[in-house]
Image: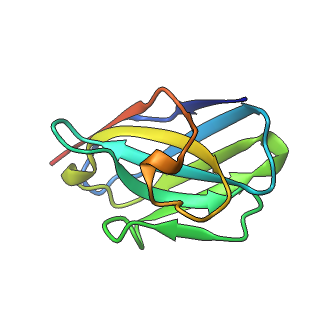
Amino acid sequence: QMQLVESGGGLVQAGDSLRLSCAASGRTFMQTTMGWFRQAPGKEREFVAAVTWSGSAADYADSVKDRFAISADNAKNTYSLQMNNLKPEDTAVYYCAAKSGWVGHTTKNAYIYWGQGTQVTVSS
């Protein structure tokens, strides 16, 4: 079992930055993939970014590439999503999630463990 707890959401203006963190407890393995997803009102939950627990691989949705950066801190059992140059369309509830292995890392149904979500609101 793995427990995930997000923090760091909030209300910011367009162009600002936010850093989301996800604290993992329970079982963590170097083969674990940690992902961030987001869900805006009335929309499907979508992939944002993912990283292997070892940090050997990372991937981003096209909509956030070059603005967001995902990282893992094994010593603290946390991983983070640095979000820069935020846009109103980034407004959503952001969820951290975990799965075994890298294959399927952009697919929400492949993830087993989920956090409770944290709200990010970007005003124009």
Residue found at x 65% / y 70%: 57
Indicate the position of residue 50 as horizontal and vertical percent values: 55, 59
Indicate the position of residue 95 as horizontal and vertical percent values: 45, 39
Residue 84 shown left or right of residue 13 in the figure: right
Res 28 quadrant in image: top right
Residue found at x 80% / y 55%: 30
Name the one closer to the observer, 65 or 59: 59
Indicate the position of residue 5 as horizontal and vertical percent values: 59, 29
Image quadrant occupied by the N terminus: top right
- Residue 84 seen in render: yes
Name the one closer to the observer, 11 or 80: 80
Q: Compared with residue 4, is residue 32 higher up or lower down, i.e. above or below?
A: below
Residue 63 shown left or right of residue 66 in the figure: left
Residue found at x 40% / y 55%: 47
Q: Compared with residue 106, is residue 20 higher up or lower down, i.e. above or below?
A: above
Q: Compared with residue 81, is residue 6 higher up or lower down, i.e. above or below?
A: above
